[in-house]
Every structure is written in C-alpha cells, then in structure tokens.
Amino acid sequence: MVPPLLVIHGGAGVERAQMTPQIEAQARAALELALRNGHARLKAGKPALDAVTAAIAVLEDDPLFNAGRGAVFTHDGRNELDASIMDGATLAAGAVAGVHRVRHPVLLARAVMEHSPHVMMVGTGAEQFAVEQGFKLVDPAYFRTEKRWQDLQKALQEDAAGEKLGARLAALKHFGTVGAVARDSEGRLAAGTSTGGMTDKRYGRVGDSPIVGAGTYANAACAVSGTGWGEFYIRVSAAREICLRMAMLDESAQQAGQAVINDEIPQMGGDGGAIILGADGSMALPFNTEGMYRGWIGADGVPHVAIYSGDPLALPEPAR
C-alpha cells in the first residue's frame, strides 16, 4: 500500500492581465473541488482511473476552463470536444475527438477504452457509440458561453483584418486544456486530458489532448497530462517522451519535465505545461507561461492549488 496522490491542471497560458480577483477565486474553488472529488475515490480504495475521471468531470462542468461547458468555438461557431485517458497498469487507453454533444468527453473516452476494441473514435461515430453506451447527449447549445463566443468574434475580426498574430497571441489560442494524473493506494497510475481545442480552429483540427503519447500517457513508472500548443506536443510525443526519460534515463519527474516542456518544445517554437507523477510519488508541474491552473492532493485530503508562476506550491517528498 502506498499513499494515494492526485495532480490536476486547468490549462497553461493564464495571464494576469486577463484575470480578476473573482476569476481567481472561482478557479481556486474549482481546482479544490476537483481535487476533493478525485481524492474521495482514492480514499474509498477506487483505482486511479476513477480519481482521474472524477476530477476532470468537475473541470468539464465549469465554464472557466476550456473543456466541456467552457469549450472554445471553432471558426464555424461550434464547440468540438476532445479527450483521452490511459491506464498505466495495463496500457489500456481510450480517446474521442470532434464530439459536439457529449457533456463529459473524458467519460466517453473511458467507455471507448473499456467497452470497445478501439482506442480512438471521432465525430458522429463517437456520439453514436456514446448513445449505445447509455450516454445522454446534450444540445450543442449547452456548451455555449458568452465569453468564449466573444473570443471567437475577436478572432474572426483579426482574421478579416488579415492580422498576423504575434507569437504570444498565436500561442494563447491553443491553451486551456484540463487534465489529471493519479496514483492509487495499490500504486497504479492513470492519466487523462480533456479540451475544447483552440479558438477559431478550422477543418476539424485536432490537437494533442486526445492523442495517446502526445497529450496523455501513463505506464507503470509515470503518468503525464499536457496543456499547450498541441502541434508541438504531437511532434515530439511529449507525454510519452517524459515517461521514457524517467524510465530509460532514470531522470526525475522534474528533470524530464524540464527537458521536454521547458527546453525541447520552446526550442521548436511552442510552449505550454504538463503535470507529471512518478510511481515513487515524485511530481512535477512544469510550464513556461505566466501561469497554469494546477494543484495536488495527498493522503491527508488537503488540496494545494496555485495559478501563477510565482505562487508557492510545496510538493510532497517522494519515497526514493
């Protein structure tokens, strides 16, 4: 038996200029609720997968985050949702992409993993599978929030004006994914990620979040969920690379996260963050933007959350 742990993120790319005390308080409360919900599963002896889905479902329901209800709009004015989940103990995985009517995409990703012979389903096929699995589809209007709609209008105006976005603004369109990684009392690891993609995306674009190995990965040694500019995470298989560095090179979570998130991806022109949990209980929450919604909870059930890069966030000591 080992102490259970849960780590979550609500997306990198947080900027102080866009924040208010009200939004900060709302974000902290949502992160704490997600941690408590996930921890309750771990405390009850449930597997890491249950903690991951419970935590992510809370964030999918909160319009503050770019997942589920707070998903951003595509160029065509729709919300397209992606999610994935992976069981580190068995390497089983499930993912969905481009769904429009599923309230909790992470739960559908888990259903793909557990009740189909496949790993990934997309679009109408994924929704047909959802109905067969007993999911109640919601009206697409459920996902609409005024803030995200205004974000799209601003992006469309920039498109029309032929504005060449600066690197920072281009990157900001890609942020806002949510994710969780967990270790249960039997030492099993799991990871999951859910997103609404990027504002003003076109042509059925899919980022790293539903791609196993890019935005989500878990094995016996490590669990990772990423948040950032998906095109870059896909190209370097970011989540799996972090786990491989920990397993093959014996790097710590901190070292592997630094190498991939803060060195390799920015060198290519991308940015973002990740949450990393090792089988030994070590964790790292690297990011290279002004802020990343993040937090963790351990055996004592006390949530620890942070938003900006300077925020204190003491991490537990791993059993090495």
Image (tube, rainbow, N blue to C red):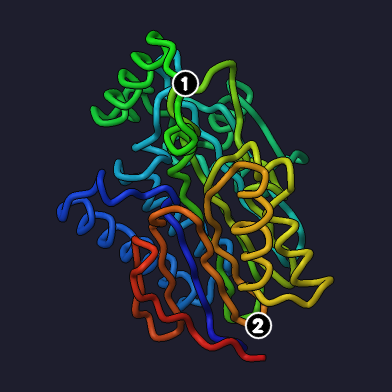
Picture quadrant of residue 127: top right
What x and y, as percent, mark residue 4?
A: 53, 79
Residue name at image x 45 percent, y 78 percent? 43
Of tags 1 and 2, which is closer to the observer?
A: 1
- Name the one closer to the observer, 230 or 89: 230
Residue name at image x 36 percent, y 74 percent? 304
Can you say which quadrant of the picture contains the N terminus?
A: bottom right
Residue name at image x 59 percent, y 43 percent? 270
Can you say which quadrant of the picture contains the C terminus?
A: bottom right
What x and y, as percent, mark residue 266?
A: 61, 49
Rate crowding at label 1 as few (under 14), some (14 to 19) or many (20 or more) other CA atoms within 10 Å. few
- Name the one closer to the observer, 246 or 287: 287
Q: Earlier in the sequence, mark 1 or mark 2?
A: 1
Picture quadrant of residue 269: top right
What x and y, as percent, mark residue 182?
A: 56, 68
- Callout 1: helix, strand or loop? loop
**In contact (CB < 8 Å): disc 1 and disc 2:** no
Extreme residue toward the bottom, this view: 320
Q: Which residue is mark 1?
A: 164
Compared to residue 87, the image places residue 158 above or below, namely above
Residue name at image x 77 percent, y 67 percent? 245
Q: Is residue 129 left or right of residue 8?
A: right
- Callout 2: helix, strand or loop? loop
Residue type marked 2: Asp
Picture quadrant of residue 263: bottom right
Q: CA distance from mark 1 to mark 2?
A: 46 Å
Q: Which mark is residue 280?
A: 2
Residue type marked 1: Lys
Compared to residue 246, the image places residue 81 above or below, namely above
Compared to residue 254, the image places residue 14 above or below, namely above
- Name the one closer to the observer, 42 or 289: 289
Q: Is residue 120 left or right of residue 178?
A: right
